[in-house]
Image: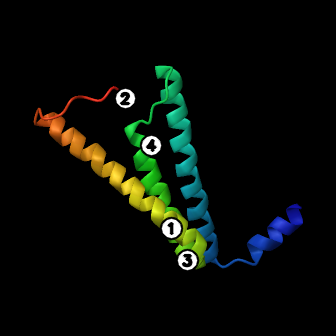
Amino acid sequence: MLERAAAWFQGQSTTDLVWVGIGFFAQLMFTMRFVLQWIASEKARRSVVPEVFWYFSLAGGALLFAYAFYRFDPVFMLGQGMGLVIYARNVYFVWTHKKSLGQGDAVPSKS
């Protein structure tokens, strides 16, 4: 197995290896969002989606979209592209809510 892995790495260009690294880093972003959501929910003893969840989602989604684009995988690009719209919209909601709190227009959330 180690020989196969070594042969695979030797057969890749530097560019491909950089993109594989970006792909792994992007997956780490997605893993961290779930870990942080789990920790926040355990502390609150209820389901909580912390603000940082959406930042990790947006960063991980953008990097995975770039990786999918590099690999020219239309299924992966479509899936990540649709997710990016949702993540960006939720970040927008977070920002507008904070702005209205600063102006005294909104009720603070419990999370």
Q: Quadrant of the C terminus?
A: top left
- Marks 4 and 2 in Cβ contact (< 8 Å): no
- Sequence-first disc among 3 and 4: 4
- Sequence-first disc among 1 and 3: 1
Residue type at mark 4? Phe
Q: Which residue is mark 2?
A: 111
Q: Quadrant of residue 1?
A: bottom right
Between 39 and 107, the one nearer to me in the picture = 107
Of discs 1 and 3, which sits in the foreground?
1
In this picture, is 103 found above or below 23? above
Give the residue at x 14% y 35%.
102
- Sequence-first disc among 4 and 1: 4
In this picture, is 41 found above or below 31? above
Q: Which residue is mark 4?
A: 53
Q: Which residue is mark 3?
A: 70
Is the residue marked by circle 2 packed among few (<14), some (14-19), or many (20+) residues within 10 Å? few
How far is disc 3 from disc 4 in space, using C-alphas? 25 Å
* Residue 107 placement (x, y as % from top left): 21, 29
Is the residue marked by circle 1 packed among few (<14), some (14-19), or many (20+) residues within 10 Å? many
Q: Which residue is mark 1?
A: 65
In the image, is 36 to the left or to the right of 107? right
- Sequence-first disc among 1 and 2: 1
Residue type at mark 3? Tyr
How far is disc 2 from disc 3 in space, using C-alphas? 37 Å
In the image, is 106 to the left or to the right of 2? left
* Residue 99 placement (x, y as % from top left): 17, 42
- Marks 1 and 2 in Cβ contact (< 8 Å): no
